[in-house]
Amino acid sequence: MTEFAQTLVDGLANGAIYASLALALVLIYRATNIVNFAQGEMAMFSTYVAWQLTAWGVPLAVTVLVTLAAALFTGAAVERVLIRPLEGTSELAVVILTIGLFLTLNAVAVWVWGGLIKTVPSVLPDATWDVGGVRLSGTSVGIVAVLVIEVVVLYGLFQFTKLGLAMRAVAESGENASLTGVDVRRILVVGWGFAAVLGAIAGLLIAPQVFLEPNFMFGVLIYSFAAAVLGGIDSPGGAVVGGLIVGVTENLAGNYVGAIGSDLKILVPLTLIVGILLVRPNGLFGTKAVTRV
């Protein structure tokens, strides 16, 4: 029973990371109706920026603030320079562009920093507590706490600020929002910037656990995409629930299903993606499309 509880706790910590990146995917999808396949690589690049700052001797707290600010600027710049010129074209063109951005960021990271593994200092406390035989690490508790803070901040933003209300209006209908005086283009820039910050947070949380190298976010992106699809690709709350479900399911399958083990855990999110698309294409909390006959 203790082993099962430990598996659940570790799964929730992993799921919180997936949920953070899934939130970024959902923010982009709600604003533009596309999936940003470069979200993981943008997070990877931000994490390399953090590593470089620490290598230069910059204090960790300052490093985190500068990294998040750089992520915000980068996300906004991507929307302004790369995405906006494709406004009015097919969604497929934008998807192809994000895949191209994925490949470009990965290649640039290899060119600038090389492909060797690097160690990133953790921003979370290195402590351990024993609760009823279950080991709670400061990292696991911190990761879940960060997710809770993200959810509270986003909820407050969307419910109680003009910017959040404008973002919700654009997500519902950019055309109608513009008719009411909302600067849709500015909101899209802000949305991409916020999504990049959420991705950077996910990168900073997971890099100290798996080590930093150019491809370290690829698996996280797959899990996070599964979380977003499971919860509903247009539902922030669904992204959180989906991330936690994916994290726990992955851990349980890896520990208790011998055929999967640690090597084939990537099959868990892929199976969830296929299953949810077949049974409930809109996800657990996604908005059902309504068409007029």
Image (cartoon, rainbow, N blue to C red):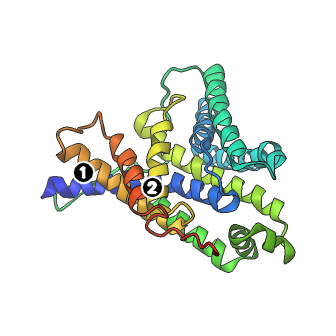
Question: What is the CA distance from the residue labelled 2 to the residue labelled 1?
Answer: 16 Å
- The answer to whether residue 127 is above or below residue 119 is below
Give the camera-side residue of 4 and 51: 4
Q: Position of residue 64 (x, y in %)?
A: 61, 47
Residue denoted by label 2: 227
Q: Given the image, on which type of amino acid does mark 2 rest? A: Ala
Relative horizontal placement of residue 17, taking residue 138 as reference (left or right): right
Q: Position of residue 131 (x, y in %)?
A: 22, 61
Q: SS class of the residue under badge 1? A: helix
The residue drawn where x is 53% and y is 43% is 203
The residue drawn where x is 54% and y is 65% is 236
Q: Given the image, on which type of amino acid does mark 1 rest? A: Leu
Q: Which mark is residue 252?
A: 1
Q: SS class of the residue under badge 2? A: helix
Q: Which mark is residue 63?
A: none
Q: Quadrant of the C terminus?
A: bottom right
Mark 2 vs 1, N-terminal side: 2
Task: Using the rendered image of the protein, determine whether residue 137 is visible from the camera's viewpoint.
Answer: no
The residue drawn where x is 76% and y is 58% is 188
User: Could you say which quadrant of the image residue 93 lies in?
Assistant: top right
Give the camera-side residue of 191 and 97: 97
